[in-house]
Image (tube, grey):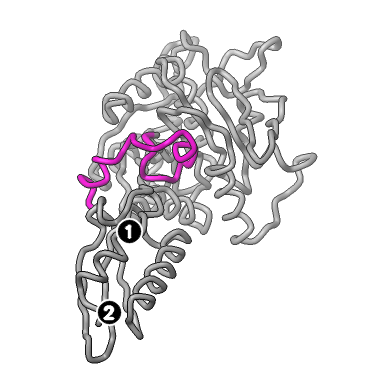
Amino acid sequence: MINEQIVREVVGELKDPFLHKPLSETDGIVSISVKPEKKHVSVKLAIAKINTAEQMNLQMKVVEVIKAAGADSVGIRFEELPAETLEKFRGTATAAEAQDLLSPLNNVEFISIASGKGGVGKSTVSVNLAVSLARLGKKVGLIDADIYGFSIPDMMGITDLPIVRGERIIPVERFGVKVISMGFFVEDNAPVVWRGPMLGKVLDQFFRDVEWGELDYLILDLPPGTGDVALDIHQMIPTTKEIVVTTPHPTAAFVAARAGAMALQTDHSILGVIENMAWFQSKVTNEKEFVFGQGGGTRLAEELRTEVLGQIPLGQPDWNEEDFAPSVYAENHPIGKIYYDIAQKVIDKTKK
């Protein structure tokens, strides 16, 4: 006759689909309830990440082994393992497992760059933060996740395309940053007219099928707003920290608050706010003109209970025809120095 001990033994041999360790070793069996007269078993299991295809596969295995042990019906509930338990296993992944950026065992720090609306310079911030982190000696990847409005390759002056080796995609490296973008896979700047499920598969490929190697940071240039693509990314990534970009204008800050709220509602954290186009500084008089007003970044940071990481004035990089990258500021450029300071703050806050 089936009993709790039998259930514990057969289920305990199954492996957490992300930690690749037996549930008995991960403390993944939370509770077991057996009703012998009805041959019904209820189990509550904790795994590294829930609401995934891997969870569904494990669920089928659990039902299979419990019924093989004598049960007629099985009820299963899942919850996520506590952060302190996950921490015990972090860094123990094999080389193959470490390739999966979405695995809880991976040590990469995800930083999403979000905005409430387009036109506030979110992609410019993404590019220059990634480059500045690389200048500070960090191993950095950059995903152009703005599927409909991809612009990262052009902004960084990238002319090469990724190489495909077997089933792996080798990202393009520029300024020490490994880059992948929808723009690499669309001919002649054609519009992307795919529906949500197809885009979700592309994003999944960007995470799972790209040969990122060892990374300290993966920067995600999110689409503006709170649409399906942004939500998919928030649900895909085990944990991410978000930087919200706004202009000083009150309306831009008001709309940006929604993007920050999405991060909080999906259990991600806000790293800080960057106020872009904060002012225009005349080269003639050296005076600052607050073209879009003042205070939007500060108000947004207060609403999201975070800090302003930096204020970026209006300007443009000094272009070099030999090494053309129209949106990347040089390290010694005044705005490049601001991005460098922001990158140092990000490192200090993430302790990387």
User: Residue 188: x and y, percent?
Assistant: 79, 39
Residue 105 among those drawn in magenta: yes
Circle 1 crowding by C-alpha within 10 Å: few under 14, some 14–19, many from 20 = some
Q: Position of residue 280 (x, y in %)?
A: 46, 23
Q: Amino acid at mark 1?
A: Glu
Which residues are drawn in magenta?
A: 82-107
Residue 41: image tag: 2
In the image, what residue occupies the spot 53% across and 43% down? 207
Left or right: where 244 falls relative to 8? right
**Residue 113 is drawn in which quadrant?**
top left
Q: Secondary structure at mark 1?
A: loop
Q: Nearer the viewer, mark 2 or mark 1?
A: 1
Image: 352 above or below 181:
above
Instruction: Write down the residue under mark 1.
Output: 13
* Residue 209 in magenta stretch: no
Q: Of helix, strand and loop, which one carries label 2?
A: strand
The three-letter code of the residue at mark 2 reads Val
In the image, is 43 to the left or to the right of 109? left
Marks 2 and 1, the one that precedes in the sequence: 1
Residue 349 location, quadrant: top left
Q: Which mark is residue 67?
A: none
* Residue 77, x across and y down, in percent: 30, 71
State the separation of the CA atoms marked 2 and 1. Answer: 17 Å
Where the N terminus falls, by quadrant? Answer: bottom left
Left or right, residue 18 beside residue 325: left
Residue at 45%, 15% (x, y): give it: 135
Q: Residue at x 34, y 27 (%)?
A: 310
Note whether 295 is above or below 264 in the view shown.
Answer: above
Q: Tell me: residue 333, above or below residue 316.
A: above
